[in-house]
Image (cartoon, rainbow, N blue to C red):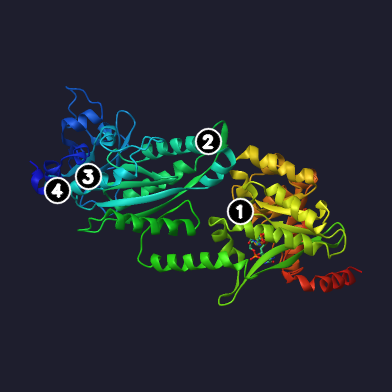
């Protein structure tokens, strides 16, 4: 029969050396042996217990797929790289199965079965979530090292934190933030194997240690975590959505410093966030250079306001009803002494992360209102508002202040919000939108069609205008889906008295098409590129001549 000491040397020695807190983590494996035709040759008592098979119910001789329905077997030969197999136990918990091909004896499947609750009790716990805390990191890491290594697996650290957590905390208060963290901790614990440890490092930061895990399985667990955390939570009666990004790093052979391991996972986390959040990344050497570059940009961005490096360009919005320019959208530019003109797409996300956007956004508002006062009455100015800015305390006040300082009638100011504003705390969002509408300010939903974009948003939130994203305008006419969406939004918008404007119109053909689809206004390079403030008077004069 199978010689375990040859197949799995490290597993056996690991247990023998364990002591102290590590003992609680001592690897305890359930074992099953399946022949190449898929029949169980042998199952140990732990395996039977896991599946709730009673004393007389020896699975030997039965088909594995009947014993453990849904658990994948590797096939007929050596286990393919990337093969992942999950076993669901009698209580519905999922465990990963590490399969090893042994030749004539078929496959041996090992399932780590440590009782995580017992294991956790050996560590100092975080009072809020009940998870092991930062002080438990060293012992948990030590325990992982003591388990030794298994073939085709690695010890992996994951760093993660919550996207938009601060927004929940700011808008619903700390007690709600605490409740959210407890719920997140619960979902995290439920998403990993019992042999993995999740620790709360502080704030909304968590670390997971995956002991002896195939990298492919780590990836599928990371994907699962991202998925479960992105589902909405009910906190203090409010429905809130956060998300998470994950950074992963592999423990190198001989490496014993957990701080180094976590630093790499942290850099990978940074990369995940930069790449757009809601994803995982493995650490790669090149990321360090990228991180330094980013830090430099953050520092320079902090100084840019003082150094007067920002300016606004204005892009005309054209109304089909009056056949004339109805307003301009203010678009920020960063004139950097070395990098040249930096696009907002490159620096706004950084400014949001560092919250520098609060100061920058206030500057844009003031500047744009003041500029609009120099235009003919009736011409509006649209200002883009970041979600961070919208949710910050005192936003409504800052809008009022910009209006008062410039003397601009509120009806000439339009605030462009993106859908991500609508995804956090509904009550606060709706209340704030109404406060702005009460001021007399107009609200517009920017980039419609790029996110979850539900037509329901148009009913639920008090918008005056919806901006159909450029991607829809540029879809070839043949794309029926885009056509139907634009027509539906235009129809619904019109029936609710909203302006429906199409963005990114570059050709006459696109202009004709969106007009035919029922849009009431257009914006795009065809009508005007974003132009400097100084050119607006000339542009308006020229366009009114054209109209005549
Ligand atoms: P957005 O608000 O959707 O603005 C439209 C973007 O599309 C602008 O890019 C504009 O220059 C570009 N665009 C307009 N017409 C056309 C066209 O016909 N073809 C093409 N290819 N592009 C067109 P820009 O200025 O680079 O701004 C990008 C985004 O940065 C904006 O998207 C907005 O979300 C953000 N942004 C710009 N200014 C500010 C600001 O002051 N505050 C905040 N929070 N975000 C800003
Ligand atoms: Mg916009
Ligand atoms: Mg847009």
Provide the secondary structure element on which disc 1 rests.
loop
Q: Is residue 517 visible?
A: no
Instruction: For the C terminus, give its image quadrant.
Output: bottom right
State ligand 1's quadrant: bottom right
- Contact (CB < 8 A) between labels 3 and 1? no
Tell me: 2 left or right of 376: left
Disc 4 versus disc 2: nearer the observer? 2
Q: Which residue is mark 1?
A: 450
Residue pointed to by mark 2? 176
What's the CA distance linking mark 3 and mark 1? 46 Å
Q: Position of residue 412 (x, y in %)?
A: 81, 55
- Give the camera-side residue of 538 and 335: 335
Horizontal side of 522 relative to 309 (left or right) equals right
**Label 4 vs 2, first from the N-terminus:** 4
Using the numbered discs, state the Cα–Cα distance from disc 4 to disc 1 in whole angstroms: 50 Å
Which residue lies under the disc numbered 4?
10
Identify the secondary structure beneath mark 4. Answer: helix
Identify the image quadrant of residue 139: top left
- Residue 283 seen in this snapshot: yes
**Quadrant showing the N terminus:** top left
Marker disc for residue 143: 3
* Residue 61 image position (x, y, % from top left): 17, 32
Q: CA distance from mark 4 to mark 2?
A: 45 Å
| Left or right: 475 as drawn, with respect to 435 | left
Question: Closer to the N terminus: mark 3 or mark 1?
Answer: 3
Q: Which residue appears at 22% of the width and 55% of the height?
A: 256
Mark 4 vs 3, N-terminal side: 4
């Amino acid at each position: 029969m199978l010689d375990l000491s040859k197949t799995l040397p490290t597993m056996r020695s690991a247990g023998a050396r364990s002591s102290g807190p590590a003992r609680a983590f001592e690897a305890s494996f359930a074992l099953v042996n399946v022949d190449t035709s898929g029949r169980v040759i042998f199952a140990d008592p732990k395996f039977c217990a896991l599946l709730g098979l009673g004393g007389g119910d020896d699975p030997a001789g039965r088909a594995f797929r009947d014993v453990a329905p849904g658990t994948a077997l590797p096939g007929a030969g050596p286990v393919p790289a990337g093969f992942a197999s999950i076993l669901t136990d009698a209580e519905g918990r999922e465990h990963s199965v590490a399969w090893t091909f042994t030749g004539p004896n078929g496959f041996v499947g090992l399932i780590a079965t440590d009782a995580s609750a017992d294991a956790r009790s050996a560590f100092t716990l975080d009072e809020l979530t009940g998870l092991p805390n930062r002080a438990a990191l060293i012992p948990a890491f030590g325990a992982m090292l003591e388990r030794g290594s298994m073939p085709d697996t690695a010890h992996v650290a994951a760093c993660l934190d919550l996207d938009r957590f601060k927004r929940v905390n700011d808008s619903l208060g700390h007690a709600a933030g605490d409740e959210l963290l407890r719920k997140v901790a619960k979902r995290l614990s439920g998403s990993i194997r019992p042999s993995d440890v999740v620790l709360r490092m502080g704030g909304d930061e968590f670390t997971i240690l995956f002991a002896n895990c195939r990298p492919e399985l780590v990836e599928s667990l990371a994907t699962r975590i991202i998925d479960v955390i992105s589902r909405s939570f009910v906190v203090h009666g409010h429905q809130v959505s956060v998300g998470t990004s994950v950074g992963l790093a592999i423990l190198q052979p001989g490496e014993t410093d957990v701080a180094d391991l976590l630093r790499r996972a942290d850099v990978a986390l940074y990369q995940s966030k930069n790449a757009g959040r809601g994803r995982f990344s493995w650490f790669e050497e090149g990321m360090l250079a990228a991180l330094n570059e980013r830090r430099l940009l953050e520092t320079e961005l902090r100084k840019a306001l003082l150094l007067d490096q920002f300016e606004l360009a204005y892009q005309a919005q054209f109304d089909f009803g009056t056949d004339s320019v109805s307003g301009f959208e203010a678009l920020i530019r960063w004139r950097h002494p070395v990098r040249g003109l930096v696009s907002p797409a490159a620096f706004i996300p950084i400014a949001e992360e560092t919250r520098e956007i609060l100061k920058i956004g206030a500057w844009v508002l003031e500047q744009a209102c003041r500029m609009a006062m120099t235009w003919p009455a009736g011409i509006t100015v649209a200002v883009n508002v970041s979600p961070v800015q919208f949710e910050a305390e005192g936003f409504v006040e800052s809008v009022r202040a910009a209006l008062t300082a410039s003397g601009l009638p509120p009806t000439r100011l339009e605030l462009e919000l993106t859908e991500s504003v609508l995804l956090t705390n509904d009550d606060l969002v709706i209340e704030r939108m109404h406060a702005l509408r009460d001021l007399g300010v107009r609200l517009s939903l920017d980039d419609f069609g790029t996110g979850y974009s539900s037509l329901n948003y148009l009913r639920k939130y008090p918008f005056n205008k919806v901006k159909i994203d450029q991607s829809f305008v540029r879809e070839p006419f043949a794309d029926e889906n885009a056509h139907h969406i634009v027509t539906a939004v235009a129809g619904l918008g019109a029936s609710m008295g909203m302006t429906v404007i199409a963005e990114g119109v570059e050709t006459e053909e696109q202009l004709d098409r969106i007009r035919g689809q029922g849009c009431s206004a257009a914006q795009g390079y065809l009508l005007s590129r974003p132009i400097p403030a100084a050119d607006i008077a000339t542009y308006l004069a020229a366009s009114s001549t054209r109209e005549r």
